[in-house]
Amino acid sequence: MDLHELTLAEASRLLGKKKISSRELTRAFLERIDTHDKTFNCFISVDKSDAMAQARVADKQIASENQTVLTGIPMALKDLLCTRGMRTTCGSKILDNFVPRYDASVVAKLKAAHGVIIGKTNLDEFAMGSSTENSAYFPTKNPWHTDYVPGGSSGGSAAAVAAQFCCAALGTDTGGSIRQPASHCGVVGLKPTYGRVSRFGLVSYASSLDQIGPIARTVEDAALVLNLIAGHDPKDSTCASQEVPDFTAGLAAFDKEGLKGMTVGIPKEYLGMEGIDPDVLTVFENAAKVLKDLGAEIVEASLPHTPYVVAAYYVIAPCEASSNLARFDGVRYGFRAKEAHDLMDMYKQTKSKGFGSEVQRRIIIGTYALSAGYYDAYYAKASQVRALIMEDFSKAFETCDILLSPVAPTPAFCIGEKTHDPLTMYLTDIFTLSANMAGVPGLSVPGGFSAKGLPIGIQMMANRFDELSLIRAGYGLEKSLVLDRRFPAL
């Protein structure tokens, strides 16, 4: 087996036994990136010398028997996470040369564990998109077929894991931006409960919806990364002080009892929607059967306010984006238009030249919805709908442990297919938005393939802070389907 084929768990075990070194592992990934990433455009930044320096330090830690599970493991970061001394662009020209003076909390934890940061991955600008076509730099291509999108907004991270450019990656999920690209790229994506992972140092899109989580090759790998990044952080007032379990206990629970005693709910509103691809339905129905065979009870569930999720989300998220992105004014940091006549002209030129069309669209929507005379009609009303959506989930979890659904209504679509139709693009996240609105955790696990050979993921959602149930069920599905080691031939 080539080094780049190792899962995170396998690589960690071999590092601990000193059968491989972090330098060898990191070099193998860097060489693979050099050879293939010009085809896929997964990375915005790769610092080879710094990655190798980190690997040398990790090898010293391992030699001194001072190893964590992630010591020496090469990982990628979505370029929305602040990295001290390393460029953080958010996929936007307005932050093209921005170099933070501090690390995001999750990055600091990774560095403290002596993981190796191999590079920063591409994304839709400021995480606003579902295809990674909105990046100011280049679109990322799906490693399974370069004519297709990898999903978004964490498309660079998902594609990098699928192309075996790293052991795992961190992404962010505001409305499905971890789970949807994980589905389209055939990897595992986990959006933790809102508040489970610190958002300090994450450049915010929508503060009440954003969450950082792992994208990995297997459910076990995702659990290992979540073990590291989860936990209370006093730097983030929204980060919960909830006790953090060992998430790999979910794997052990499945190995011991299968899914016996678990109840899986299937939301009737989801499967009654128009436009679900037949291949997606086939994969979903097979997954439900597999879970039943593993001992789970399958029941019907209801999320009655599902028809209002997309509309409510695309009021709340742009409103928060309008507020968060107001700071990029050309005064304090980032891009500044140089030929402005006065201060107001500088503001206008900076934002019109620095932000892409999708970001401008969402800022305009949000600013309008927050303006005098419209706040109550739009933002306040959307917030009330959000409260009803949260109530739907609370009631559903009174009768089931997890909710099962497709991740997206279709497999990955062709590059350029939806770029001129924003509403159609927004509807690709129809199954994932609810988890962010309700603040519950969601998991995407590879479920199968379309007739064209494109990956299709299965989504599981659980009650707040019950990631263990997701990991247990996701691990069982993965193990039964035997899809976890299928990766595209580059």
Image (tube, helix red, strand yellow):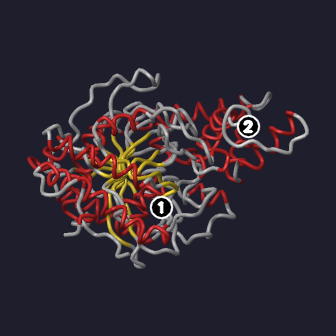
Q: Is residue 182 left or right of residue 141?
A: left
**Vertical comparison of 60 with 411: above or below:** above
Q: Name the residue at 61% across, 59% down.
A: 137
Q: Name the residue at 59% across, 31% down.
A: 383
| CA neighbours of label 2 inside 10 A, class few (<14), some (14 to 19), many (20+) | many
The number of callouts visible is 2
Q: Of helix, strand and loop, which one carries label 2?
A: loop
Residue 54 x %, y %: 33, 46
* Residue, disc 2: 330
* Residue, disc 1: 42
Q: Of helix, strand and loop, which one carries label 1?
A: loop
Residue 422 appears in the figure: yes
Residue 178 x %, y %: 44, 50
**Vertical comparison of 418 with 328: above or below:** below
Q: Amino acid at mark 1?
A: Cys
Q: Is residue 232 left or right of residue 145?
A: left
Residue 130 x %, y %: 55, 56
